Image (cartoon, rainbow, N blue to C red):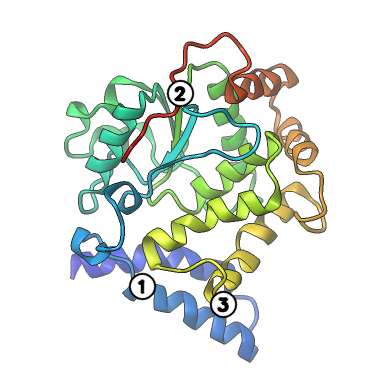
Amino acid sequence: MKNSKKIFIFVAVFLCFFIANSDAKEINKKNFYRSLASRLSKNREDYQNLNDYEFANFREITSTGIAAGILYRSSSPVKTWGNRNIIADRAAMRAGVKTFVNLADDYKNLAGYRGFSESYYSAQKIICLNLNLKFKSKNFQAGVARAVNFMADSEPPYLIHCDLGKDRCGIFCAILESLMGASSEEIVNDYMISFYNYFGIMPGSDEYNLVANNEIKPFLASIFEVKNIESANLASAAAEYLLKAGVPLKNIETLKEKLSNSGVYNIKNSVSLT
């Protein structure tokens, strides 16, 4: 019963985005998100089609403007739900991650996770932001500003995560990708990898388009205050968003240098995780 409750808690975050309307189209949408609960599992054997890194939703971000071996994302390397955290922690160690941005926890919760003190993660530089899922809220925007300032003042490689590494992590990574010059297609594709890793949603499917058109595309357009992400200058929109959030221009430029590896940083090339 406890595991079932956890699964429904993870999936419930989707439903808050689609409560407002009650027409047939919206009802079908709600039913689709509810159906995802049956696909989400903590058990490795339920994901035979994935390698370990995909199971942990761990990957390198390789979109336009971001150098190899600089930026990674994953599910939580410390929150225990199956053994995803163990895989993510080991992958981060193998990639040489030095700086972790934890979007989900506060410091008290973090220290209480089983095995935290023995993890690779615990010995690195960490910021805990405890962000909510309201991406237009002051809480989220202020957290993004803190994260960017922290990254600008910290050494790469970086790893971004929340719990599943999907929603808060997905939006924050999309902001960074936008800042660095990624196309809307690159951003959507990276966001949607998580939905394949957790729910088996295939690129080009109706489910894929439903999620992309109701999550990453409108969410990012909303926080950037643009009509749509396909026609917008996303790099400019991201920079303006960060400036409005209170990030100094100097820190934005510093982080861009670090993500592009154009500064003098002793960073290895991308680490093979296969």
Q: CA distance from mark 2 to mark 1?
A: 38 Å
Q: Is residue 203 above or below residue 66?
A: below
Please tell me whether mark 2 or mark 1 is closer to you in this view: 2
Residue located at (45% from left, 23% from top): 269
Disc 2 vs disc 3: Cβ atoms closer than 8 Å? no
Residue 165 image offset from top left, x and y in percent: 43, 48
Residue 10 image offset from top left, x and y in percent: 37, 62
The residue at which mark 2 appears reads as: 269
* Numbered label attached to residue 37: 1
The residue at which mark 3 appears reads as: 206
Q: Amino acid at mark 3?
A: Asp
Residue 157 image offset from top left, x and y in percent: 45, 24
Image-quadrant location for residue 172: top right
| Mark before the other along the chain sequence, 2 or 3 | 3
Classify mark 2: helix, strand or loop: loop
Q: Is residue 250 above or below residue 127?
A: above
Q: Residue furthest top?
A: 264
| Mark before the other along the chain sequence, 3 or 1 | 1
Q: CA distance from mark 3 to mark 1?
A: 18 Å
